[in-house]
Image (cartoon, grey):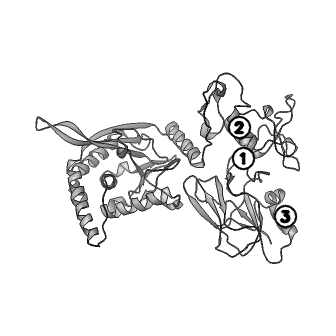
Amino acid sequence: MAVRILMPALSPTMTEGTLARWLKKTGDSVVSGDVIAEIETDKATMELEVADDGTLARILVEEGSEGIPVNQVIAVLSESGDDDAAVDDAAAEKAAVAAAGSGKTSSGRGEAKPQGEDAGEEGKKASGPGKTPAGAERAGKTDDTGRADATGAAGNGRQRVFASPLARRMAEQESLDLNALSGSGPRGRIVKADIEAALQSGAGRSPGAGRLAGGPASAMAVTPDFDLLPPHEALRHTAMRRVIAERMSLSKQTAPHFELTVDCQIDRLLAIRKELNDKAKADKEAGREATPLSVNDFVIRAAGLALKQVPEANAMWTPDALLRFQRADISVAVAVEGGLVTPVVRGVESRGLGEISREVRTLAKKARDGKLAPEEYQGGTFSVSNLGMYGVRQFNAVINPPQGAILAVGAGEPRPVVRDGALAVATVMTCTLSVDHRAMDGVIGAQFLAAFRALIENPLTMLL
């Protein structure tokens, strides 16, 4: 029987993705394990493999399509003996709904069950698992062409407007009035291009003061009065940008942050780093393997050892229990085009500086290339964010949920200090710990910073 290929869930938190590129075309023969497409998540670009042999009979979602919900049918694979009717049934919207709890499916990474119905024209739908489709409160019905009735409550007197589910979701997120827009789709249906045009022109927005925009990522965002704004370019949010907005808003709203700051004198650290890097340079010139060390490598190592010394700081709040971890898996913030990702260096407390440095470099490159696997950026217990290379002296980082703390590291710079009652100059690095007060109290954060500073200021103890 025909096999429905679904948008896979590439991580536990993924609800939608972007179909970046099809690597196979309609009519191509495939065997189990073949890569047929590339899927973009908010973190990386992953390959989609088929789990069955057959022919790629139907592609239902065009490459470049964004916001495709997990478990939506994106293609149909025909097996030996399947006729066109079988393929049509597998691709049909009603068949997808009927087969939600049963039937043969192929998600590329094991079988998955579709949740909800297909989105129609755009090949997308407005909801992920556990969500109500955007605009569902207003949608009266959907006819056999897939056009949605946006009339709203019965008897509200507004004209009937047809819009694709994707257009409806975009309108909800941007607070656009569909009744004020005209559609360019079949029979005047409003589609994605019409919403994008409206965003560029400001059409469909009520005049006057801004209002709260809908959608989880913009629940607290005020929509400006576009008529009063100067000329500008509207850059559509990427999946990464939306997820960052959602997670950081969630963190600030649900985790009661408090911050603690210490100044670390790093002259000894810089001297040891120079000595080790000079040796690494000589080894490299001699043809031996060598790894140069950055200040951030020392910071990560010190954070891991400090978490080992103060295990109460290596904790995470959950509604049912406080999780206290026995290993320091540190998420390292890496800037990438359009956002930020946090690959995880695992077991930092038991790894040497050279090993940490190599791991960080490898993960950072994969992050910038969009090639991180889910297991490489999930499951961290603590985060480090370093903006020192940009000359930032001090900052307060937002906790990366559901973790309990994040360490913000500033630039090392010459500052006046007092030594033995006399004024002197030292290279000082300011570090600020943001803590979830549900997971730990101030004294725990202070103990962690004391252990961290002792390691940074006496770096030889990190080499033991």
Identify the image quadrant of the C terminus: bottom left
Residue 224, x across and y down, in percent: 62, 28
Q: Nearer the viewer, residue 265 or 337?
A: 337
**Callout count:** 3
Decide if residue 109 is on the left or right side of residue 317: right
Question: Which kind of residue does numbered mark 2 sit on?
Answer: Glu
Question: Residue under circle 2?
Answer: 172
Mark positioned earlier in the residue sequence (2 or 1): 1
Q: Nearer the viewer, residue 379 or 165?
A: 165
Image height of 223 relative to 14, above or below? above
The numbered mark at residue 126 is: 1
Question: Which kind of residue does numbered mark 1 sit on?
Answer: Ala
Q: Nearer the viewer, residue 364 or 460?
A: 364
Q: Residue furthest top?
A: 208
Decide if residue 27 is on the left or right side of residue 44: right
Disc 2, SS: helix
Residue 200, x across and y down, in percent: 68, 36
Q: Residue at (60%, 48%) from the top-left corner?
A: 239
Disc 3, SS: helix
Mark positioned earlier in the residue sequence (3 or 2): 3
Q: Residue furthest bottom?
A: 80
Residue 401 visible to the viewer = yes
* Mark 1 → mark 3, Cα distance in angstroms: 23 Å
Mark positioned earlier in the residue sequence (1 or 3): 3
Residue 204, x across and y down, in percent: 74, 31
Image height of 455 relative to 428, above or below? below
Residue 283, x across and y down, in percent: 26, 69
Question: Residue under circle 3?
Answer: 89
* Callouts 2 and 1 close, C-beta under 8 Å: yes
* Mark 3 → mark 2, Cα distance in angstroms: 32 Å
- Mark 3 crowdedness (10 Å alpha carbons): few <14, some 14-19, many ≥20: some
